Image (tube, rainbow, N blue to C red):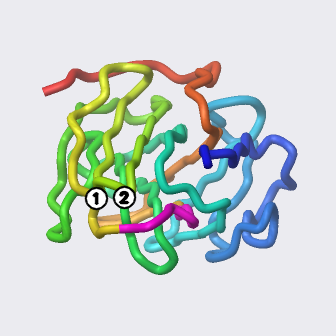
Amino acid sequence: MAWTYKQKFDDLNNGDLDGQDNWSGSTDIDVSETSPCQGTKSVRTNTEGAYIERSIDAVANGILYVTMKSDAPSDSSVEFYLKDGGNDIACVTLHTDQTISFYITSGWQRYVIQDYTPGDCYRIGIEFNATTDKYRVNVNGGEWTDWKDTIASFDTINTIRLMLYEAYGPSWGYWDFISPNAEEPAKARSQGHIF
């Protein structure tokens, strides 16, 4: 079964994402018209450790896209997780060192893709495969990374999580337009370089 979940957040009510569209978690993560990457609304928070999850139709092998933004990378990491039940399987981060990275292997090693510019929106593609326990990532339609080991072995991806990991101080993290295709949000721009 292919990835099917799609959400632009534009039709949700402003305020807590918790309780809307089957999302559950922190009440500090809000639907907001402030600085969306696509359309009229996005989801954002500036609360340390805030996270929210949603169950999805289980997928063993698939591709999805999510748009992410950070306004002050030296303070917080903006993170998007794929999970199998309670287990973290994949995590893409706009990291505090101002890179777009993703975590690999059970040791949570961080694989750096490219730099990013604060305030710019980035369209992140994630492809995963339960047969091989690997995933790969691309940014704004660029080349895919090599396949890398997931954080843990898995049968399916059935949960997604949005999280702001705050290391040094409050800053805003944004998420927008989760979908099964790479349709480009109107405001997304490519920055940085691959190394």
The answer to whether residue 14 is left or right of residue 49 is: right
User: SS at mark 2?
Assistant: strand
Residue at screen point 63% across, 76% down: 25
Provide the residue span drawn in magenta: 154-161
Where residue 113 appears, x then y in whole percent?
Answer: 23, 35
Q: Which residue, given by chain and number where applicable, does mark 2 sit on?
A: 90
Q: Residues within 10 Å of mark 2 (few under 14, many from 20)?
A: many
The quadrant in which residue 40 appears is top right
Residue at screen point 51% across, 77% down: 85
User: SS at mark 1?
Assistant: loop
Where residue 54 appears, x then y in whole percent?
Answer: 65, 66
The answer to whether residue 101 is left or right of residue 33 is: left
Marks 1/2 in contact by CB < 8 Å: the verdict is yes
Question: Label 2 sits on what residue type?
Answer: Ala
184 in relation to 48, above or below: above
Residue at screen point 21% across, 35% down: 146
The quadrant in which residue 10 appears is top right
Q: Which residue, given by chain and number where applicable, does mark 1 sit on?
A: 150
47 in relation to 74, above or below: below
Where residue 176 appears, x then y in whole percent?
Answer: 62, 42
